[in-house]
Image: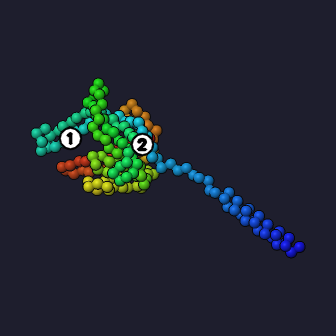
Amino acid sequence: MRTFGTMNGYLKIVFLLVVLFLGLHSCKKDEVSYDLHYGYFGLIQGRYVDYEVMEIKHDVDQAIPHDTSRYQLRTIIGDTIIDNEGRVAREFLRFKRTNASQPWLQTDIWTAIIVDRKAELVEENQRMIKLVFEPSVNKEWNPNAYNAYDELTAYYRDIHQKSVMGSLSFDSTLVVEQEDFFSLIDYRRKYEVYAK
């Protein structure tokens, strides 16, 4: 009779342990999907963007102080590669042509990657931080933190805004301000607009 009572006690303990174990594993928190908005720096193979470019150079020390050139630029996200830091990145291919009747000529192969919530682009062997995720009005960063260029302070404005550029309409864009310098002899303004 005593043996039966001890066995019954063990069964109760085992039963309680099993119930406790199952109860702990069934109380998982629901996984929450959080959008960091990596779509602003879409690294999908084959994705391309065409640009109409107008470059204006002002240099009073030259024989021709104002030089303007116009061309078309196409960037294409290429295959995965291993970058110079041993990370899996994407080729960032650049093509140029003078107008739509000319063939595209490849000019550069750069690399692009999103790592540690930063979008990085290596252009001409200089690593630039283009975006920091998640975009917000209080974020600031140095785009030149990984290269030898002068330090800049970049920040976001007009985040997730609809925008129309020429004949194109975009549901969600943002602006990265990089430089806005004015003096009596120099004016430099640099900003980039990204669309999802």
Estimate the x, y position of residue 98 in percent, counting from the top left: 26, 30
The residue sitting at 29% across, 24% down in the picture is 101
> Is residue 25 depicted above or below 100 in this figure?
below
In the drawing, does residue 152 fall left or right of residue 26?
left
Q: Amino acid at mark 1?
A: Lys
Horizontal and vertical percent position of residue 140: 37, 55
The total of numbered circles placed on residues is 2
Tag 2 residue: 43
Q: Nearer the viewer, residue 11 or 66?
A: 11
Q: Nearer the viewer, residue 49 or 80?
A: 80
Mark 2 vs 1, N-terminal side: 2
Residue at label 1? 57
| Residue pictured at 33% horizontal, 39% vertical | 93
State the residue in front, 144 or 175: 144
Give residue 49's mark: none
Q: Is residue 182 left or right of residue 10?
A: left
* Distance between mark 2 and mark 1 Cα atoms: 31 Å
Hey, what amino acid is under mark 2? Leu
Spot occupied by residue 49 in the image (x, y as percentages of width and height): 37, 36
